[in-house]
């Protein structure tokens, strides 16, 4: 009888130990899931620049391409730096425009910042009746002061030039064009990674 009681006590200890282990493991998994969800939620609040309006093209004394970027994230974007490249659709020459632009002020949520690319008449004559298309690549880099992280975005556009005196719009490039552009940038040794 004493032996049976001892076996029952041992089984009770084993079941109790296993239950404690399962509860501890469940608590660890819950903490991990909670921390992961909090990190993802925090990351989702990061600044994110997007365009809500079509880029504008004007030709007077020179060619002006204006892009307006809006911060649709929750956190502000600070130290915005952009590098813009403009090159002929044939991709046979170096870019006609290669500049870096920096914004000192922060861009809060639901605010915008404009980027104006101006091409002089010595490169593109605004009086031409027909101008071939050009690609435009804009690399944006900005800081999130809350997450203490740097984010980068690169956007690819194509300006369809001028046809019979009519200014054509700026459109997004297609996937195969993006691959060709990336190859061109590599051949020209033009890095888009860090603009700061």
Image (cartoon, rainbow, N blue to C red):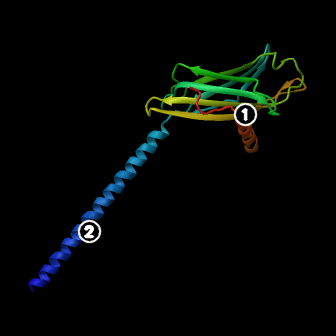
Quick one: label 2, few (<14), some, or many (20+) residues within 10 Å?
few
Residue at label 1?
157
**Residue 69 percent across, percent down from the top left:** 61, 28
Residue 154 or residue 56, whichever sits in front: 154
In the figure, is residue 168 to the left or right of 70? right
Which residue is at 38% across, 49% downward? 34
Point out residue 47 in the picture as x, y percentages from the top left corner: 52, 33
Residue 10 falls left or right of residue 191: left
> Reading the chain from its start, which is encountered first: label 1 or label 2?
2
Q: How many discs appear? A: 2
Q: Quadrant of residue 171?
A: top right
The residue lying toward the viewer, choosing from 13 and 169, is 13
Q: Position of residue 179 (x, y in %)?
A: 73, 42
Q: Residue drawn 20% across and 76% down?
A: 11
Residue 60 x %, y %? 80, 15
- Secondary structure of residue under mark 1: strand
Q: Is residue 8 left or right of residue 45?
A: left
Where is residue 89, by image quadrant?
A: top right
Q: Give the quadrant of the C terminus.
A: top right
Residue underneath mark 2: 18
Residue pictured at 82% horizontal, 20% vertical? 124
Residue at point 62%, 21% (across, down): 101
């Amino acid at each position: 009888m004493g032996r049976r009681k001892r076996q029952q006590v041992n089984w009770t200890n084993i079941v109790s130990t296993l239950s404690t282990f399962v509860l501890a493991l469940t608590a660890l998994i819950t903490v991990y899931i909670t921390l992961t969800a909090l990190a993802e939620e925090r990351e989702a609040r990061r600044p994110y620049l997007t365009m809500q309006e079509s880029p504008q093209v004007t030709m007077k004394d020179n060619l002006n391409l204006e892009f307006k970027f809006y911060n649709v994230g929750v956190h502000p974007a600070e130290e915005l730096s952009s590098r813009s490249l403009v090159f002929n659709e044939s991709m046979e020459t170096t870019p006609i425009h290669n500049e870096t632009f920096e914004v000192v002020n922060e861009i809060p949520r639901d605010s915008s910042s404009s980027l104006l690319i101006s091409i002089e008449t010595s490169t593109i004559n605004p009086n031409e009746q027909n101008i071939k298309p050009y690609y435009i690549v804009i690399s944006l880099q900005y800081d999130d002061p809350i997450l203490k992280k740097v984010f980068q975005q690169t956007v690819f556009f194509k300006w369809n030039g001028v046809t019979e005196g009519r200014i054509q719009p700026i459109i997004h490039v297609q996937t195969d064009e993006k691959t060709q552009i990336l190859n061109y940038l590599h051949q020209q040794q033009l890095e888009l990674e860090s603009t700061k």
